[in-house]
Image: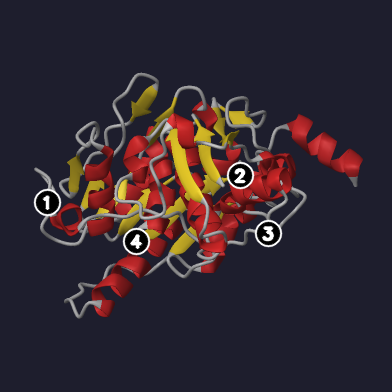
Amino acid sequence: MNIVLRNMQSPGDVLMLTAALRDIKRWYPHWEIDVKTSTDALWENNPYITRLTPGDVDMVLGMEYPAIHESNQNKEVHFIHGFIKFINEKLNLQVKLTEFKPDIHLTDEEKEKKLPGEPDEPFWIFVAGGKEDYPHKAMWTERWQEIVDHLDGIPLVQSGGSDEGHFHYTMKGDHVTNMVGKTPNMRDLMGLIYRSVGVISHVTFHMHLAMALDSYAVTVAGGLEPPNWEAYPTYKHKYVHTIGELPCCGENACWKLKNCENLEDGKQKCFDIIDMEYVAGCVRQFHERYHKDRGLEFKPYKPEPKQEERIVRLDEAKKKTPKKAKDESEKSE
């Protein structure tokens, strides 16, 4: 079979397709597979691709992941399974996931290439922004700045695209380097994430890249997207969510990325109840582990907040839940 896999969605979607192509080729090594996607940079150096001429192609298959629509009900389905599940059902295949991560191949030069402004010390990538078409997927300036303030002393590199439709808040701090818009070459971004300790963000392309490149990730997710669909089962990923803490996401993720119904002063309640000192504590733990694993000197930071303090903050936030949401919760009981 000579097949072309086609997907013209966002880079995050195409990144997940890299895992599907890898595993299709591993289970069906006699297949010759090419791709047509919106993000060519993700396929550079990929050993599983065969570039086909139009006359050699038996099939062009538009790749989809309808499994997302059952992500709240099927707790065993993850984003990375989506394309594999689709092609198995479409072509009656038996492809199984071989590695729980997207498939990216950097050259030694890309791994070692240092970018202008890149810190010399171990650093974290920080994404404080998002896309205008999904405004409620990300937090607001003050909440991101809280994390930055708690991480004083740890070098942070603020990253993100400057393309039309993207927005980014400027973070303050002597330990922050602003590189927003300075990695227009996606391969440079991949190398930067590879050299970093990890990524701090909401659910983003950066987060998934960190997992593909075996870096750490601390993700502030709120109640929007289910952990079974987005979180990676690895000790390198901390997925901070609030599903089960508010009526609007009491049992399942709400998936309201652009029309949140539980706002206070225009801000999503599911993000507001998260203790950002706890988030920073997760980063510090990973930062210490990174240093110890490499035999590097580590300077300890102040400890995480006590569990009792986090519970008090959570209870106080719940008391401010809009009356409508409370009434709906009471009716369902």
Residue 270 percent across, percent down from the top left: 59, 42
Q: Circle 1 sits on which residue? A: 114
Q: CA distance from mark 4 to mark 2?
A: 22 Å
Q: Circle 2 sits in a helix, a strand or a loop, which is it?
A: loop
Query: Which comes before the other along the chain, label 3 or label 4?
Result: 3
Which of pointers 2 and 1 indicates the residue nearer the eye? Answer: 1
Pointers 2 and 3 in contact (C-beta within 8 Å):
no
Q: Nearer the viewer, residue 126 or 146?
A: 126
**Element assignment for label 1:** loop
Q: Nearer the viewer, residue 33 or 131?
A: 33
Q: Amino acid at mark 4?
A: Ser
Give the residue at mark 2: 225
In this picture, residue 204 sits left or right of residue 83: left
Of the numbered discs in the image, which one, if any, rests on residue 215?
4
Q: Residue at x 51, y 62 (%)?
A: 26
The Cα atoms of the two marked residues, 3 and 1, are separated by: 42 Å
Of labels 3 and 1, the one closer to you: 3
- The residue most toward the front is 55
Q: Position of residue 213 (x, y in %)?
A: 35, 58
**Dot 3 corresponds to which residue?**
94
Tell me the kind of residue under disc 2: Glu
Mark earlier in primary sequence (2, 3): 3
Question: Which residue corresponds to the image point at 14% horizontal and 55% vertical from the top-left?
Answer: 109
Quarter of the image for residue 37 reads: top left
- Looking at the rendered image, the disc whose residue lies closer to the viewer, 4 or 2, is 4
